[in-house]
Amino acid sequence: MGAQRVAVLGAGNGGRTAAAELGLGGHDVTLFGRPEFGDRLSRIADTGRIRATGVIEGDAPVRVTSDLPDAVANQDLLLVVVPTNYQLTYAHLLAPLLRDGMNVALMPGSLGSLEFVQYLREAGVTADVTVSEFAALPYATRITAPDEVHVFGRRSLVSAGVFPAVAAPRVSPILESLYPGLQLMRNVLEAGLNNPNPTLHCLGVLLSASRIEFSHGDFYYYEEGMTPHVCRAIEAIDAERVAIGDALGVSVMSLLDTYPTVGYGPRGDTFWSVIRGVASLHGIKGPERVDSRYLTEDVPIGLTVYSQLGRAMGVPAPLMESVIALSGALLSQDFAADGRTLQRCGIADLDRDRLLQYVTTGEVLELGP
C-alpha cells in the first residue's frame, strides 16, 4: 500500500516520535494534543514540522490540531500513543466519533485493546471498528525541544495484534505500510503479554527505591539500577509473564531474548549480560522519583492484569502479586482495585477456550446447557 492517513493521538515522547517517523516515511500525519495542555505544540503547529535526531533523523511534515473530531476524520488509522493508564480516557473521547470501518491502534497495549473494546460496548457503541495493539513502543526517545525529539533507539522488530483477530486482513496492510516488516501476532493476548515494561520496570524500581529518593533526581535506572542481583530477580518475575503466555498457547519473548531480537543489544546467558550491552538505554535519566510511571503505570495497568490472567489460567505469579502489594504499600495506593483488571477487560468469567474464541472472533462462545 502507498501513503496512509494517520492521526497520532497523544503528543508526548512516543507520540511525537511516531509522528516524526511516519511523516518522514511519506505518510499524511496529523498530531493531536488535548486542548487542556495549552500551547505546547505551538512551535510544531507554526512550522508544520517535527525535527528528529539520533537513530531517526530529519524534519518531518506534520499537521497539528487540538480538535479531536477534525483529527480523526477521514483517517486510515487512529494511533493512540499515550501512557497505558490514559488509554481508557481516549476510549471515552473517541466513543462518539467512531464509525464503521475505522481502525484504532494502541501503542503500546498491555491488553488495553480488551479494556478499550469493553468500554465501547458498555457505552453502546455499535460501529464496526478494529482495535489493534502494538506489543511495545518501538522507540527509546525523549523530547529535547518544543519541536524536536531525540531517538536513542528504535526497535528493528515491530509487532502488533488485532482485535478481533479475524479482522486482521482489513487493518494489517495499513499497519505494515506504516511499519514495514511488521510482525502480525496471533491475537491481542500475544501482543499484550509481549510488552516487557511491567516486568522490566516495577521490581527494579522497588529494589532501587532508597537510591532513587536519596539521589534527588540524579538516577539512571539502566546504569545504576540494573545490577547483577537485581537483574536476577527481574529474570524471575519475567519468567512468570512467559509462563502465562505458555498457558494461553501464545509466544511471549523473555527479556533475555527481547533485546537482541529487536536489535537493541547483544545476546547473553543472563539478563544482566544483555542489558549492560544495550547502548541506546545508556544516558537516559530517571525515574527521578519513586512515584513515577515505572510504578504508577506499569503496576496497575501491566502487572495487575498479567497476574490476574495468570491466576485464571492456573499459573501462579507470586512475584507479580508481591510487587503489586509492596508498590501499593510504598505509595499508599490500592493498585489491584484501581488497575486494569479482567473485569474491566470483559474477560473475567472466561476459561482458556472461551477467551481464545473471544479474541479471535470478538464474540463469547456461549456455554452449553
Image: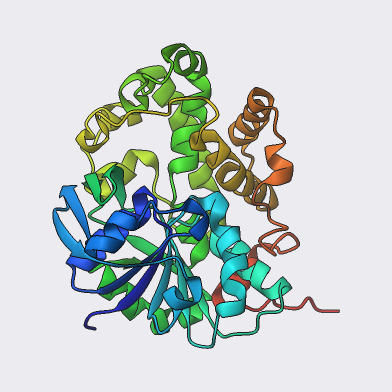
Depth check: 323 or 3 in front? 3
Q: Residue 197: percent from the left, percent from the top?
A: 44, 42
Evaluate whether residue 111 shows in this view. no
Give the color scheme: rainbow, by chain, secondary structure or one colour: rainbow
Nearer-the-camera pick, 182 or 310: 182
Q: Residue at point 41% right, 21% down?
A: 217
Q: Is residue 358 left or right of residue 56?
A: right
Measuring 49% from the left and 81% from the top, which residue is drawn there? 166
Task: Using residue 268 as the reference point, say whether residue 247 is left or right of it.
Answer: right
Task: Please tell me whether residue 365 is drawn above or below residue 116 in the rendered image.
Answer: below
Task: Residue 266: give x, y in percent of width and height.
Answer: 20, 37
How many discs mark residues in the rendered view? 0
Residue shown at 34% from the left, 38% from the top: 256
**Does 49 sit above or below residue 289?**
below
Q: From where the camera sits, is residue 177 visible?
A: yes
Looking at the figure, which quarter contains the C terminus? bottom right
Q: Residue at x 43, y 79 (%)?
A: 168
* Quadrant of the rendered image containing residue 31: bottom left
Q: Is residue 190 above or below residue 300?
A: below
Rendering coords of residue 7 (x, y %):
38, 71
Image quarter in which the N terminus is found? bottom left
Residue closest to the far bottom: 100
86 is higher (above) or lower (below) than 259: below
Would you identify the image quadrant in which residue 231 lies? top left
Which residue is the extreme one toward the left? 58
User: Is 122 on the left or on the right of 116, as rendered?
Assistant: right
Toward the viewer: 324 or 367? 324
Query: Which residue in the rendered view is the most extreme toward the right?
Result: 369
Image spot of residue 149 (x, y percent): 25, 47
